[in-house]
Image (tube, rainbow, N blue to C red):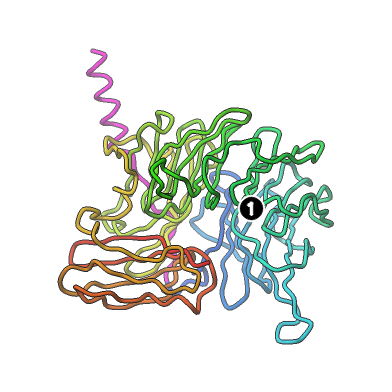
Amino acid sequence: MKLHLLTMLLLCHTAFAQWSPVKTFYSSSPIQAITDFDFLSEQKGFLISYNNNKSTFYRTTNGGSTWDSTTTVEGFFKSVVMVTDSIIYAAGNVDINLGTPNAYQSKQIYRSLNAGQSWTQHEILNTLGLLDRNCMVFTNDSTGFVSCYAGMYFTNDYGTSWTLLNATSGQFPVHLGSQIATFYNNDVYLTNTSSLASQTNTLDCYGIGGVGFTSSYGDTLIRTNNCNDGWGNTLRALTISELGGSTTVLHFLDEGISDVALNASGIYAVSQRPLRSIDGGQSFFRQECTLPSDSLLYFTRIEFIDNDIAYALAVNQDSGMIKLLKTTNAGGITTNYVTQPLQNVGGFNDNASSSIQISPNPSTNGIFDVSGIQTGNAKLLVYNELGQVVFQATLAGNGKQSIDLSNQTPGVYFAHISQGEQQWVKKLVVR
């Protein structure tokens, strides 16, 4: 009886273990390049859309079905946080006096205290570098931290003024218990949210830096970073740490991870599709979409509201259109289990594409060499993190060809290679 009941539960979970579309942003939509989004509840959220050096802040009150513009500002804004229904912060980069000898880049924050009806502008710092996605975390309505390679900055007056706490405290701040954790190379910095005192290397990074994506739940931290595998090879690693405890490598991987998440329902790593573990990272299974037409979606973001409800952004690899998707049961449970190495789920047909190589990766000049196309021609499209095609070419078999991203800004890109029914996705990094 118990076995039969368990089987029925697994079948039920499998049947509903899917992500459903909420909104499609077509090329004709005013919302095209989405740099960030944040949902406070199942119904209320904000997103940032970027176009031609302007950022527009949009609000939804019906779960993402419709979005209303609240304001448009100059600059490239990549992070938005809803602290309450009324208090919203957006952080980004604004070029001042562009084209003149007095030009500089200002790191700024826009704040709304009335659910987006009006916004005030405040400067955080002036320096090189960019405020990136996930650069900002707030511990209450008025107290927040912004972190980048220029240092960590702190406010306790609703973002009106900012104070430098540490000049090398790293990127990607996450709330870890009573600490704010940030990452710089292979160091993990912990800043106490009460005393603002900072400590270094109190968490074993188990690697050589290069943190890409982070998430936390209580005193537990998950991240991707560069790591040594014990045989002299440097790979990407998905690792998990306990505050005051040890660090465990869950998986070594080669393919692109575009986001991670952690909560009571499991561990999540987005590699084209959301991957979920419910056994502490010992095994992962792959989640799918409800519509067959969404088979070409490449997930780029995942954001949990609670342990069950989450929203995600995904890009159609053929058309470039963006979709907002939602799950109400943490994506459910499937029997499509994934075992090591994790990169075996990175593309649509990994066995067929295992001979394809792209190097060097990362690239310091934006030039990559592609080899391993065996016969015939293959189609190549390279997307940026906003879902825009920045490079395309036809790859001929039995030869080496180049991807030229030298005119693109440093960051993460996704190369999509298709040949007949075989398709493959590879993350590219330009430094």
Residue 15 horizontal side relative to residue 22, left or right? left
Q: Label 1, on which residue?
A: 171
Residue 68 in percent (x, y) is at 59, 63
Q: Is residue 80 left or right of residue 353?
A: right
Q: Tell me what residue is drawn at x 35 percent, y 37 percent.
A: 284
Give the tally of numbered discs. 1
Residue at position x 43%, y 30% in the image: 280
Q: Which residues are magenta?
A: 1-26
Image: 94 above or below 180: below
Q: Residue furthest top?
A: 1
In the rendered image, the vertical position of residue 377 relative to residue 221, given as above or below: below
Q: Is residue 25 magenta?
A: yes
Q: From the viewer's side, name the closer residue of 289 and 388.
A: 388
Residue 318, given in percent of the width and then of the height, sits at 32, 68
- Residue 87 at what x, y percent from top left? 72, 51
Q: Quadrant of the N terminus?
A: top left
Q: Residue at x 44, y 49 (%)?
A: 236
Q: Please state the horizontal and vertical placement of residue 288, each as a whole percent of the image.
A: 32, 47
Looking at the rendered structure, the secondary structure element under dot 1 is: strand
- Which picture quadrant has residue 194? top right
Mark 1 closeness class: few <14, some 14–19, many ≥20 residues within 10 Å: many
Nearest the eye: 152 or 420: 152
Q: Is residue 95 above or below residue 111?
A: below
- Which residue is depicted at the point 72% across and 41% down? 139
Residue farthest to the left, as pictured: 375
Q: What residue type is disc 1 on?
A: Gln
Looking at this view, name the residue that lies furthest to the bottom. Answer: 100
Magenta span contains residue 7: yes
Rendered view: 230 above or below 212: above
